[in-house]
Image (spheres, grey):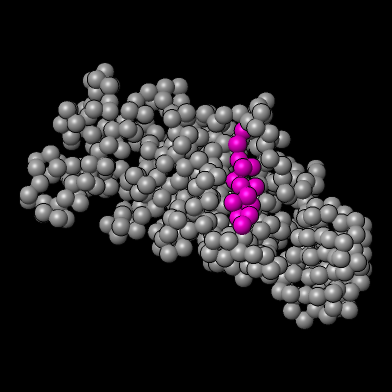
Amino acid sequence: MLKHAAIERHGLAEIHGVLAFVDGVSGVGFHDEVEIAGSDGVARPGRVLAATEKGVIIEVFGATDGMQLDASHACFRGHPMRFGVGTELLGRVFDGLGRPRDGLPTPPAIEMRPIIGAAINPVRRAYPRDFLETGISSIDALNSVVLGQKIPIFTTSGLGHDDLAMQIVRQAHAPGVEKFAIVFAALGLPRETAQRYLLDFAAGGARARLIAFLNYADDPTAERLITPRCALTAAEYLAFDLGYHVLAILHDMTNYGEALREISAARGEIPSRKGYPGYLYSDLASIFERAGRIEGRPGSLTQVPVVTLPSGDLSHPIPDLTGYVTEGQIVLDADIARRGVQPPVNVLASLSRLMSDGIGEGRTRRDHAAVARQLYAAVARVERARSLAAIIGADELTEIERTYLAFGERFEREFLAQRADEARRIAGTLTIAWRLLSMLPRPELTRVPPDMLEEFLP
């Protein structure tokens, strides 16, 4: 019934949710691929979660309801779960386990690669220094992304993060680079949302340079733990074998963390913060650290995970630990969204730790860093003026404080706010920034060198 088996066992000792237990099995390894067939004849993929002298715990990617212990059959493949990589991946849609979901045959594979991946040797890592343009002013000017960086989007429900992610996919490119690709992984998204992504990709012309992996909300929870690893295996092949610059969107990593907590609870592990396993940090790191560049290889792998904040809590374990592993964050803010600004990026809460290495003369423009510093300082003064106005009233503010209030309104309306179909080049974004800075008195522009003021200020 099951072919090419390394080890076969008839009968299961126990089934508990998505976990199956098999006694008396030896010679299998951690995360080895398994196939379990029940009395219904349906083969369910799985992998080894634990192996001891007494037996093996298997994580099953499929429904286990109605499976009979004595009538079930387990086949241990003798190798970790793998995904077939090849030159015909672009334009394809797969499910969370890497099986075709677009009605087309499985693409021919040049090689079957373990999805667990391998950490990039720190000695071989090349430092990211090349600018990645998203066409979105609040990101490109103030939270610039570089090729090989990992920077998450922190959001809550209703803040338009889906529209932002779609816009990034449509518009993102590396200036001067032809081989650019997108890998999109949907982790526990509603079917309507995932299909909306696919329709937008097709309408925006991004489908030809895209590989999508879709794990729906009603798919097996355990499958969510495999989806990002399949996606990153494909991304690594494009980046480090074919020389593409790859942008990977992982949405939503909070659903991934919830799946990890559910599997951990089923295994009876001792929980840590808020019920999550103690290895949540290292597990997230095993995903995020696959981004980067390698010395001697022309491509790069950039990650933009989307993280929904439970109850808007930045200190929640998932965003908290994500922030430790990644190199900054783009934070969406409900108050800004309520003022009708889309995308509602909170400039002061957002950060790109590699920004200074990817901008400036020869990369974007020589005034980029100075403009960003001055905008940050001005937005901070705006927030201070708004807080003061809320206490004593706008009429009691000084003239310069009222100027900053006016600056803040125009900054949100003309710089932050951007149509979903509006792609701004970095030169256009900096032009808007200079126009806004011209509202402020010259003595306030202390972050910009005098020669740049003379050259760029209208």
Would residue 175 be seen by someone viewing this image from the given angle? no
Q: Nearer the viewer, residue 12 or 66?
A: 12
> Is residue 71 in the magenta section?
no
In the image, residue 340 sits, relative to residue 269, either above or below, namely above
Please name the residue shown 12% across and 39% down the image.
Answer: 400
165 lies above or below 451? below
Q: Is residue 190 left or right of residue 62?
A: left
Q: Is residue 292 magenta?
A: yes
Residue drawn at x 47%, y 28% as measured from the top left: 357
Q: Residue furthest top?
A: 451
Query: What percent of the width, then of the height, locates residue 228?
Result: 64, 53
Q: Residue at x 79, y 65 (%)?
A: 57
- 61 left or right of 310? right
Q: Position of residue 281 (x, y in %)?
A: 59, 51
The segment highlighted magenta reads 278-293
Q: Is residue 346 left or right of residue 326?
A: left
- Residue 323: tell me if it is visible: yes
